[in-house]
Amino acid sequence: MSTATNTVSGQTNASAATDCDAVVVGAGLAGLHQLYRLRRLGLNVVAFEASDGVGGVWHHNRYPGARVDSHFPHYQYWFSRDLWEESEWTERFPAQPEIEAYLNHACDKFGLREHIRFNTKVTAAHYDEASGTWTVSTDDGKSLTTRFLVLNSGGLSAPRQSPFPGAGTFRGVSCHTASWPKDGVELAGKRVGVIGTAATGIQVIQTIAPIVSHLSVFQRTPNFAVPMKNPKITPEQNSAAQADFERLRGVVHNTFGGFAYEGEPPMFDDTDEAERQARLEELWAAGTLQIWGGAFADAFANAEASHYVTEFVRAKIRARINDPKLADKLLPTDHYFGSRRVPLETGYFETYNRDNVELVDLREEPIVSIDAAGINTATRHIDLDVIIYATGFEAGVGAINRIAITGRDHRSLRDEWNKALRTTVGMQVHGFPNLFMTMAPFAPASALCNLPVCADHQVDWIGDAIAYVHTNGKTSIEPSAETEAAWMAHHVEVSEPTMLGSNKNSWYRHKREDGSIGELIAYAGGIPQYRETCDAMVASGFKGFIVR
């Protein structure tokens, strides 16, 4: 047993003894940083990781073609210059093995592995108001008590399982992209079906099409995508980025989405037709995500600008598909470009020009069931050797809701969120003292941010809040109901009127247990506005929070 000690001020919190000061759930990109930050505060921290290794999504998502869509040098930790200067990247958009190796290196460099309990899933957490402690239970039947509970379980880490009857009867190989076997899956010469055409599905489809005998792509919702330009990174480029660390760090933390682009985007109405075309052509050729939200300063808020960019992208995609009727099926018509996540792709649309690739439009012939030999649609049976589920995740809240969390007065977080999803700056919830989270709804990190940048800020804010409780000899901290309501009102004000709010069919919207469409989880106010609010909370001594 240990009593929580504030090594920053030398004071000791005289409240109930605990097994540890803090529990961190998850050892992915944010979880490792959180563990590092809390250890730097001098806290006794235990981290739980459900898998057998670190890396989170980069440990599980080993599917063919898996790579990041944040371009060099943005997708790496910003809290350590030493680590930055040790990192030698090989591609502009690194693939899964390179990122997983990087996160393992960071874990070992900072001595974090010994504080992580692997192959252990947190199943429940109960807050005891009398002692001000959390009891955290795990799937091995054990439990421990802690003062602080930090959920770094990931916004896209709870995969959606097959909703189709008979999935368990399939005699071939079936797997979800988010739990890809370490030894891989034999695909060469096989009849393969891929269900899902969002970011992950696109990467899988374009990668395996040349090696399988036949590929059936089951598409429910067509998606926009932008060509990825992925050259090798030279030693000189690595050195230049390392030398530019301080400037880049200052820039990315004050941009809308965590990327340092040259120049500010113009307002749509401040450009003429020639300027608009030239700008879009330049951004399209750049091969990054800059065209998404960065084509014009008001691209998310100005319907005319959104329509203009959307038509430009549609024309670019249509020109790459040989069959006009097929192009009609592959081109979205029910949402603006950028109102759903925009993937990067490499020859994805040309994949459908291949003789061995077939598009199954689920809006015309939905999947009815799966049997031992393959998939039954409403009109036919498709024989398959392999079924790949690229069906996405329970975004934003899925991983958190898989833990039975009860706060003050036996409140169930899962039940409360099913009625009305809410957070305060995406990091705390009223009624759940000393419970923190990253990548939760209503913060840039939930959807519209280069994660290492947004996680950097959230991890530090959580560390500051915990340090504040210790320094002042207090027991707990949580937002007041008024503070939470004010944040939710602000979120609705800046996010719902945008093009993101216009699209009711994307993972940016919360899906309730009954299947109904709920809140827009993507915060569209941008990093600077978000940081200003969060930093003001710290500077004010957490005014508007209940600190006991």
Image: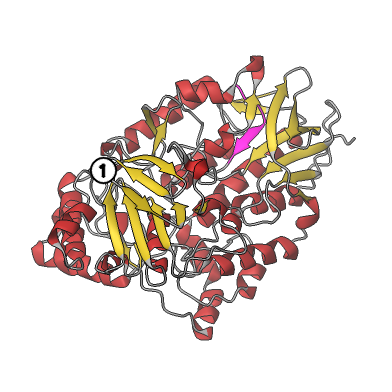
- Density class for disc 1 (Cα within 10 Å; few <14, some 14-19, many ≥20) is few
Q: In front: 68, or 478?
A: 68
Give the residue displayed 41% in from the left and 50% down from the top: 374
Measuring 58% from the left and 68% from the top, which residue is drawn there? 97
Residue 288 magenta: no
Q: Which residues are magenta?
A: 431-437
Left or right, residue 5 beside residue 53: right
Residue type beneath disc 1: Thr
Quarter of the figure with the C terminus:
top right
Residue located farthest toward the left when viewing the structure as drawn: 273
- Looking at the picture, how far across and down is residue 433, in whole percent? 65, 26
Residue 78 position within the rendered picture, expressed as x and y whole percent measured from the top left: 58, 61
* Image coords of residue 476 (percent x, y): 70, 27
Q: Is residue 519 left or right of residue 54?
A: left
Task: Work out whether 9 lies above or below 136.
Answer: below
Q: Which color scheme did the rendering employ for the protein? A: secondary structure
Q: State whether residue 101 is above or below residue 362.
A: below
Quadrant the N terminus occupies: top right
- Number of residue marks: 1
Where does residue 354 sit, x and y in percent of width and height? Answer: 27, 69
Q: Secondary structure at mark 1?
A: loop
Find residue 245 and report its image quarter. Answer: bottom right
Q: Residue at x 57, y 64 (%)?
A: 184
Q: Would residue 301 be found to the left or right of residue 47 on screen? A: left
Report the residue that reaches farthest toward the right: 1
Query: Can residue 160 be seen here?
Result: no
User: Residue under circle 1?
Assistant: 379
Left or right side of 117 for 303: left
Residue at screen point 16% across, 63% down = 323
